[in-house]
Image (cartoon, coloured by chain):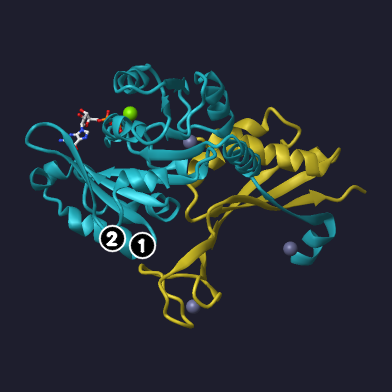
Amino acid sequence: MCKAHHHVVEEIDLDCVVQEEDIKHSEQLKASFRAAGVRAVGLLGSPGSGKTTLLETLVPRLMKKRRVAVIEGDLATDNDARRIQAAGAPAVELNTDGACHLDASMVEKAFAQLPEPKPELLLIENVGNLVCPVDFPVGEELRLAVISAAEGEDKPLKYPAAVLRTEGVIISKTDLAPYVHVDPHKMAAYVKTMNPRSRVFFSHFDATGQLAIEAADGGSNLEDWLIG
Amino acid sequence: MHEASLAANVLKIVSRAAAGKESRVRQITVSVGQLAGVMPDALLFAFEALKKQTLLTSATLKLEKEPVTACCEDCGHEYQPQAFPYTCPICQSHVFRITNGEAVTVKRMEIKKGD
Ligand SMILES: Nc1nc2c(ncn2[C@@H]2O[C@H](COP(=O)(O)OP(=O)(O)OP(=O)(O)O)[C@@H](O)[C@H]2O)c(=O)[nH]1
Ligand SMILES: [Mg+2]
Ligand SMILES: [Zn+2]
Ligand SMILES: [Zn+2]
Ligand SMILES: [Zn+2]
């Protein structure tokens, strides 16, 4: 039977990567960012993991050293872009109307909408989603996954692509760790075990309600690492 | 979650390759990397729904898992890591670069031969 099957069916090898166009587009975008002196950094993570809060804190600090702008990705609303504008930086909101991740063509269009002069440091907050944005680079030099302590201690292990396919992980909301029975240092250790080259940071609201950010791996602080 | 657009790309790649023989395409084999953010069931479902809008109505989708491979940054050996920490079997290094297991790839298709 197997023989007969081979007689009537011809097998053709294709070996075509399905996301190839997206990957190529991201490479092109990265090259054009580089040529224009723009360093793009991506933030990805579950809905509500604290991405915009982090940007609100980082933006004023980064603006002392670089011209900064932000592209915000959300299914709906321009709330996050308005939060960034309130923090002092130009921001464009990209509404994906249901799409679960940003892609390079969306980011290219949003970048064109940013006011002149264009930024030296472009921060791109992806749609809240810990799964698919890793599959769709959008011209970034660095990608950072934001995983909150409140999501549970084993999240790095459960979402290995978010740890293995990014350059850094922020374990956010460590102030909540005691309430959710999580040891943030264990989360940091998981990340380091999975991806020894990954940078790891902690962030939390301090007693005055300010966001405090610290390196969890003895390396440089987050701002310096982002600036490169 | 974006499996519909992936399925549409699979159909596009196969249609282009079949070039006129679309209705004779039978099994399409697609490998899904273990680090790709893809749900196999959703991809199959989207494929079945979307193929009806193409000439590939006799095609079926077979999914394979593509394991992760890592390249040791210290000695250059390529290996299939098992558990964390990824460890090079040759030099025991934990420093690596992922070389496979991130993509979704259309591997091959079967075309029924004409008489
Ligand atoms: N306790 C605590 N709450 C935090 C911290 N960081 C952010 N939050 C809160 O978490 C909620 C979500 O924060 P956002 O910064 O909007 O989260 P996001 O990741 O941008 O959310 P999406 O863009 O919707 O995916 C807000 O109510 C924040 O105030 C933190 O370090 N500690
Ligand atoms: Mg946000
Ligand atoms: Zn056979
Ligand atoms: Zn997606
Ligand atoms: Zn080695």
| Residue closer to the observer: B58 or A40 | A40
**Image coordinates for residue A56, horizontal then vertical, percent:** 28, 29
The yellow chain is B
Chain of the residue displaying label 1? A
Q: Is residue B58 visible?
A: no
Image spot of residue A219 (x, y percent): 30, 57
Q: State whether residue A201 appears in this view.
A: yes
Q: Quadrant of residue A60?
A: top left
Q: Position of residue B37 (x, y in %)?
A: 47, 46
- The three-letter code of the residue at mark 2 reads Tyr
Which residue position is annotated with label 1? A194
Q: Colour of chain A?
A: cyan
Furthest-front residue in view?
A64
> What element does badge 1 sit on?
helix
Q: Residues within 10 Å of mark 2 (few under 14, many from 20)?
A: many
Relative to A227, residue B80 above or below: below
Dot 2 falls on a residue whose secondary structure is: helix
The residue shown at (33%, 23%) is A84
Q: Is residue A194 left or right of residue B107?
A: left
Say which residue label 2 marks.
A190
Residue at x 52%, y 36% (from the top left corner): A38
Q: Name the chain under label 2.
A: A
**Residue shown at 33%/49% (left/top)?**
A169
